[in-house]
Amino acid sequence: MISHEFIMSPCYGIIEDVLIQIHSQIYEGEPLFKIRNREGNIETVRVELSGKIHSLEVQRGDRVIPGVVLAFVKEDSFLIENR
């Protein structure tokens, strides 16, 4: 079963690094983005899902706010169950 999920920004900040590419496979807990928050600290975005990156909605240098979509993922429950 395949479902579509999205990855959202947890904070206000600037995208410092995008660690994934479109069509790349991601796994639960893997670092996906690095965001420099308002305090100047780097926050690493990780998610609790596995799947394939369908689209990237931000790039390095973009400003983000909490809840903005960073990427869309085609989640595959088969990958989660059989990993």
Image (cartoon, rainbow, N blue to C red):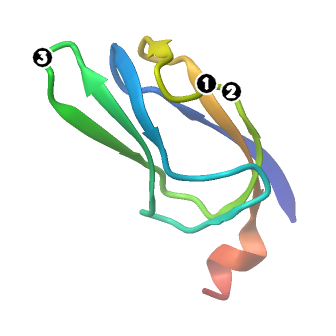
Q: Is residue 76 left or right of residue 70?
A: right
User: Residue at horizontal 79%, vertical 57%?
Assistant: 23
Which quarter of the figure has residue 38? Answer: top left
Residue occupied by mark 3: 39
Q: Nearer the viewer, residue 59 or 47?
A: 59
User: Residue at horizontal 42%, vertical 63%?
Assistant: 29
Labels 1 and 2: the sequence-earlier one: 2
**Residue 41 x %, y %:** 15, 29
Residue contact at pointers 1 and 2, CB within 8 angstroms: yes
Query: Which numbered dot is residue 80?
Result: none
Local SS, label 2: loop
Residue occupied by mark 2: 57
- Nearest to viewer (mark 1 / mark 3): 3
Quadrant occupied by the C terminus: bottom right
Q: Nearer the viewer, residue 19 or 7?
A: 19
Local SS, label 3: loop
Query: What amino acid type should be assigned to the residue bearing mark 3?
Result: Glu
Q: CA distance from mark 1 to mark 2?
A: 7 Å
User: Residue at horizontal 61%, vertical 24%?
Assistant: 69
Residue occupied by mark 1: 69
Residue contact at pointers 3 and 2, CB within 8 angstroms: no
Q: Vertically, is 66 above or below 15?
A: above
Quadrant occupied by the N terminus: bottom right
Q: Is residue 38 left or right of residue 73?
A: left
Query: What amino acid type should be assigned to the residue bearing mark 1?
Result: Val
